[in-house]
Image (tube, helix red, strand yellow):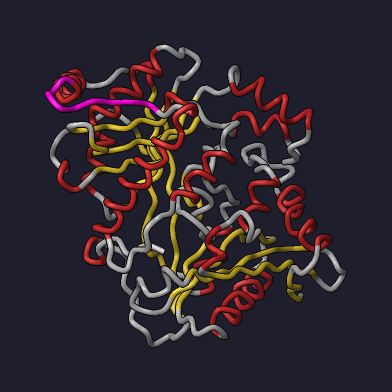
Amino acid sequence: MKCIEVTDKDLARKWIEFPKHHYKDDPHWVCPLDVEIESIFNPKSNLCFQHGEAVRWIMINDQEQICGRIAAFIDQKKVNHYDYPTGGAGFFECINDQEAANVLFDTAKAWLEARGIQAMLAPINFGENYSHWGLLVEGFIQQGYGMQYNYPYYQALFENYGFKNYFDQLSFHKDIADGFPEHLMKFAEYTETRPGNSFEHFRFADSEKYVNDFVYIYNEVWSKFHDGYTPLKHEEISSLINEAKLLLEEEFIWFAYNQGKPAALMVVFPDINQVLRKLKNGKLTLINKLKLVYFRKRAVSRSRVLLFGLMPEFKNSGLVAALFLQLVKVLRTKPRHKQIELSWVGDYNPKMISIYEKIGSKPAKKHVTYMKLFDPKAKFRRFDNEFEGKLY
């Protein structure tokens, strides 16, 4: 078995197509849009290339058959957020063969080591952690949009190679029909009506205003969350909004303001995977675009909470509960929406886990972010609050 670097369109096509054959008999796997995956490895669309690099490989066996793939990447903004210079690997797919998996992992490791990297997070994204991040180890059901799906045997492939559990990513499901605790709703309603508080949902017509507010809140929150943070740029969120325009619903993105100033935000996506499974081949053809628009209003019954952001000075203000109340109000007007997925929250964040449990949501899935230290004598530490949020 050997790995071949993706250097032309034909190899890129083979890299994209491999999972479609790999999971063809698995009813739970949903084929992502080719254009979404390709954009991650396109310097024109992924701004991470301004301060990083990425590479992909396919693996072939002695019969010239493709039996695996992987990608590796370095983001110079995040390399030093750890005890050791750290890069990433992701988009791993492999047959059930430890030797094959080792070849893929070794290839990514060698590329990273050649660039001074001493540790590897996997499987992760070359971008933000709300999509294509973590290995599924519990809850082998159809995943929500942006959440990783893989075969159960992948866990053994990672751990046998020497990857260690850096942190767990926990996802919860809440059935809307079950209702919400009355005392929490009353608290949210009280916070909603407190003088100075106001709430608005995103509107494409005023997208510049809301993108500015998003960037302001996100940068304020994350600059406090870890040192060395490089501010998010307006163009990054504006590009994301434009790319996801077909998938977004204005009333699913909410902002809280205090005295007219941005204080908190919540980003929710309809679970478009419920539509993408009907497209099957991942191609955004004209027919599939029409299907996407048609089924988005008819087939989506679940929404996924991607992000909460709360300015530090409003930590105990109840604004998170009030934002959640805005979503509940919207969902009550959309009877086709039956469930909310809250994904994901790290096992290092007991406060948020407690909030999810208090609203009556149930644990549904667990993904794992693994780390591999290249020096076997190096000391490994799991991610926890002592790291002050230094995520890749």
- Locate the N terminus and report the quarter of the image it occupies: bottom right
Q: Position of residue 308 (x, y in %)?
A: 32, 41
Q: What is the tally of numbered marks visible in this picture?
A: 0
Residue at (53, 58) in percent of width and height: 125
In this rendering, position of residue 40 left or right of residue 220: right
Residue 35 is a magenta residue: no
Q: Is residue 38 visible?
A: yes
Taking the spot 57% from the left edge, 32% from the top edge, the residue there is: 247
Where residue 338 sits: x, y (%)? 45, 20
The image quadrant of residue 318 is top left
Q: Is 84 located above or below residue 198 in the figure? A: below
- Name the residue: 63% across, 41% down: 29
Q: Is residue 343 above or below residue 158?
A: above
Q: Quadrant of the C terminus?
A: bottom left
Residue 388 lies in what quarter of the image?
Answer: bottom left
Is residue 155 visible to the viewer in this orientation of the structure? no
Q: Is residue 199 magenta?
A: yes
Tell me residue 185's x, y (percent): 21, 20
Q: Is residue 305 left or right of residue 89?
A: left
In-image side of 110 versus 198 (left or right):
right
Q: Quadrant of residue 86?
A: bottom left
**Where 38 sits versus 94, above or below?**
above
Residue drawn at x 21%, y 45% as measured from the top left = 351
Residue 120 place in picture, x, y as percent: 48, 72
Q: Nearer the viewer, residue 336 or 231?
A: 231
Farthest right residue? 63
Q: Which span of residues is magenta-colored?
A: 193-201
